[in-house]
Image (cartoon, rainbow, N blue to C red):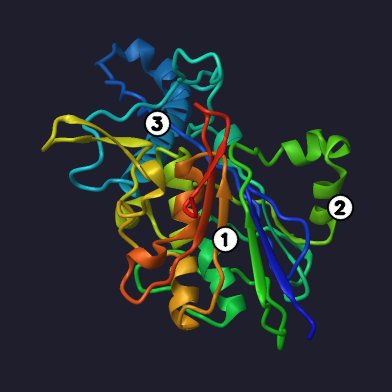
Amino acid sequence: MTTRRTFVISSRLTACGAVLHALTLVVMAWTPSGQQVKPSPASDAPRIRRAAPADAAALAKRQRFLEMFARAYFPGRTGQLLIVPREGDFITRPDPDVAYMHGSPWPYDVSIPLMFAGPAVRAGVYSTPAVQQDIAPTLAAALGVQMPRTATGRVLPVLRTGFARPRVVMLLVLDGMRRDYFDRYAGSMPTLAALRRHSAWFTQARVNFLPTNTAVGHSTISTGTDPRVHGITGVSVYDRVHRRRHNSFEGGMPQDLMALTLADVWQLATAGRAIILAQGSIDRAATPLAGHGACQLNGAPVVLASYDQQTGHWNTNLN
């Protein structure tokens, strides 16, 4: 029997298959403070008129940031203060292993690589706007299933007419991968560069919510919906009942995710026959891609593996 594969790349890329997408995840947030215009003498009028375009651009930028925050606002989980670093700056923590961080609303962080490849895909360069939320609905269409009404994304126009359904789908996410890296460092990653040439490549793919850290981005990719729906609003939230920090997906537990994932939908559609494998560098990277598994009603176990930064070993749910 011939096995067909589908690969997806989303700041996590794949090498072969029927459908593939690429994207990059981002992280923090800051809302530029609005500037008040004070009354000025008539002699200042020409100067004010010249400054108006800059003011209009600042207001438009501020509105875009607010809309990104709104897509990720989940009552009880979203913080009271939302921060955006100045362009060119980043927010990190005093950890020798984390000297730099991704995650801002600026173009170098929100412009993400997104590609689909495989027999089911019409290769080419697409200028159609695309977001992370479009990935799961597109892969679901390739598999012949449909994401639930909670999905806010759409099916991207990359699938061939009359294509054969893939038996395998691979979703590869390159966390923090900027789209311009595919041009600047093409010579250093020949496999990915070749994959891009034979894929459906989106030139206008962007992240449209804040904050865009790993937990939020991977949950958005897997569910096809906004953080305001799936409920993952950051790497951690404050547990107001127990008055302590609560880390999203700690220990590989998916209960914080409030929407079904592509893996969940495929598993339910096949009555548990679909095999779901997820591997990531940390819990919050792998767990949302694996879905709820046996934690959902009529669900079946999945295979989940993540790297333990403290011990240097891989942890799995098969232990």
Q: CA distance from mark 2 to mark 1?
A: 26 Å
- Which residue position holds label 3? 29
- Which residue position holds label 2? 194
Location of residue 270 with respect to 216 vertically, above or below: below
Location of residue 49 with respect to 105 vertically, above or below: above
Furthest-left residue in this view: 241
Between discs 3 and 1, the one toward the N terminus: 3
- Which residue position holds label 1? 277
Q: Please tell me which residue is depicted at 45% across the width and 12% down the height of the picture.
A: 94
Which amino acid, mark 1? Leu
Which amino acid, mark 3? Ala
* Residue 244: image location, x then y, percent: 20, 29
For the residues bearing labels 3 and 2, Cβ distance under 8 angstroms = no
Location of the N terminus by quadrant is bottom right
Q: Nearer the viewer, residue 100 or 127?
A: 100
Give neighbour class at mark 3: few <14, some 14-19, many 20+ (Cα, 10 Å): many
Give neighbour class at mark 2: few <14, some 14-19, many 20+ (Cα, 10 Å): few
Which amino acid, mark 2? Ala
Give neighbour class at mark 1: few <14, some 14-19, many 20+ (Cα, 10 Å): some
On the question of residue 192 being in view, the answer is yes
In which image quadrant can residue 83 be found? top left
For the residues bearing labels 2 and 1, Cβ distance under 8 angstroms = no
Count of numbered badges drawn on the protein: 3
Please tell me whether mark 2 sits on a helix, a strand or a loop: helix
Q: CA distance from mark 3 to mark 2?
A: 34 Å
Q: Please tell me which residue is depicted at 57% across the width and 60% down the height of the picture.
A: 277
Q: Please tell me which residue is depicted at 76% across the width and 41% down the height of the picture.
A: 182
Q: Nearer the viewer, residue 107 or 283?
A: 283
Please tell me whether mark 3 sits on a helix, a strand or a loop: loop
Between discs 2 and 1, the one toward the N terminus: 2
Closer to viewer: mark 3 or mark 1: 1
Between discs 3 and 2, the one toward the N terminus: 3
